[in-house]
Amino acid sequence: MFDFTATYTDQYQLAMSQVYFKNGKRDTKAVFDYYFRKIPYGSGFAIFAGLEDLLEIITNLRFSKKDIEFLKQYDFEDDFLEYLANFKFSGNIYSVQEGDVVFPTRPVLQVEANLIEAQIIETILLNLLNFQTLIATKASRMRLVSGERVLLDFGLRRAQGPGGYYASRAAMIGGFNGTSNVIAGRDLDIPVSGTMAHSFIQSYDDELTAFREFAKGRPKGCVLLVDTYDTLKSGVPNAIIVAKEMENRGQKLMAIRLDSGDLAYLGKKARKQLDDAGLDYVKIAASNQLDEFVIKSLQEQDAPIDVYGVGTNLVIGKPDAALDGVYKLTFSDGQPRIKISESLIKTTLPHRKQVYRMKDENGECAGVDVIAMGNENNAELSKVFHPSEPYKFLDVSAYQKEALLQPVMENGEMKIKKRTLAEIAEYSKSRLAELPYEYKRFNNPHIYKVSISEKLKAERDRLISEHKM
């Protein structure tokens, strides 16, 4: 979709990399953690998305001749530019599976590579994972409140440029059924769906003629937009006339669409008009600034809406707009590394790590993820601690422990089998189903616990003491 060369990065990544290169640190091994600090939208969970796109891009990430020529004007030295001309990521990446439910402060993905390679991929990693995770989480919230109703992504025209392409992908992972985005449908095998615009109806002298012409030209999957002039006095009655004419031709009108006004009221009135005309099979679609709050309200009012077309609020991630994902160094040159903050919650956790999901004796999610040292045996995990309130601890010795960080790239090559978008979405649905209801509540969800192992806590505290001496 987009020409991702290795210049899809921030300048300071290259500036730091040149210093590493000149100081003989280009082969220094490092570990970086990707995680986020806050769940968006007041949700109790986030849906991880963007991984397979990222791995595919990193596999092919190179500096082109055009890139190298461009960088010459920014004081990069010739030997370093020669190194970049032969750049290829050759490191390892460990990650949770795309589509999984994830929580703040715990590693979602871990990069193990030389310092230069790890720095150069940071920007594209954050760009892709933060955005798609944000949109997939928004989509999942809409799926939870809409039940089995059809959800369609209508947001491309309001998206931030090409971000609309990745928003369509993430929406599917979060539980949407289709998109109006044709190029995303082509590339990602997403069902493509659309109706008509008001301009089509306005281009004819009257609404009925417009409906008739559209139905003749697009009889399969025909959806008529009924609010151009007067929804209940003109739009729906004219749609009924055309639906009857279609029946006489052995065809069926699929749906009408409401795009303005009181959607619950108009939906109920339109449903009665359709049913009274013997058109109970004609569905009602609704659009117009929908989000999870509007959908929840419509559901609670028993609005007879069968299809929700969601645009702006989905693809821009309103109101949060960005996921605060970060990428932090935790190990380099054989030593654990730490970044200390006045707030303990912002102090990074050192070392290579593994994350375990705690499950009870029935194999059900216990509402706890534990961050442990990478070399810790899960059998050792018993007493675990709150990451920022050290006197809070939990005994997890009786829990089953599922290791979440698995190798997805080795020596720069994808290790996992590429899945279809439908397979990722189905996996996400299954993982969300495992999460207890209290964490999926729309309002005031229960806070999912993220703890650190006793050994990791001791290492963090030791490094804090050393650096503050």
Image: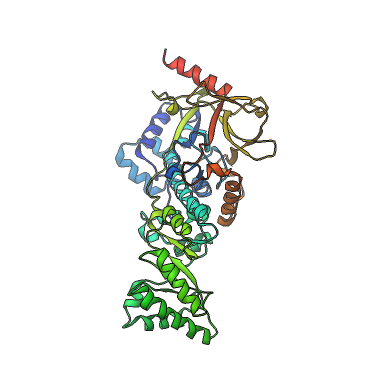
- Viewer-proximal residue among 56 and 257: 257
The residue located at (53%, 55%) in the rendering is 175
Residue 340: x and y in percent read: 42, 23
Residue 377: x and y in percent read: 65, 27
- Left or right: residue 83 versus residue 358 is left
- Left or right: residue 100 versus residue 23 is right
Numbered-mark total? 0
The residue located at (37%, 49%) in the rendering is 66
Residue at the right extreme, as displayed: 361
Residue 440: x and y in percent read: 53, 45
In the image, residue 67 sits, relative to residue 186, either above or below, namely: above
**Is the N terminus in the top left, top right, bottom left or bottom right quadrant?**
bottom left
Residue 314: x and y in percent read: 42, 54
In the image, residue 295 sits, relative to residue 323, either above or below, namely: below
- Viewer-proximal residue among 55 and 178: 178
- Viewer-proximal residue among 400 and 348: 400
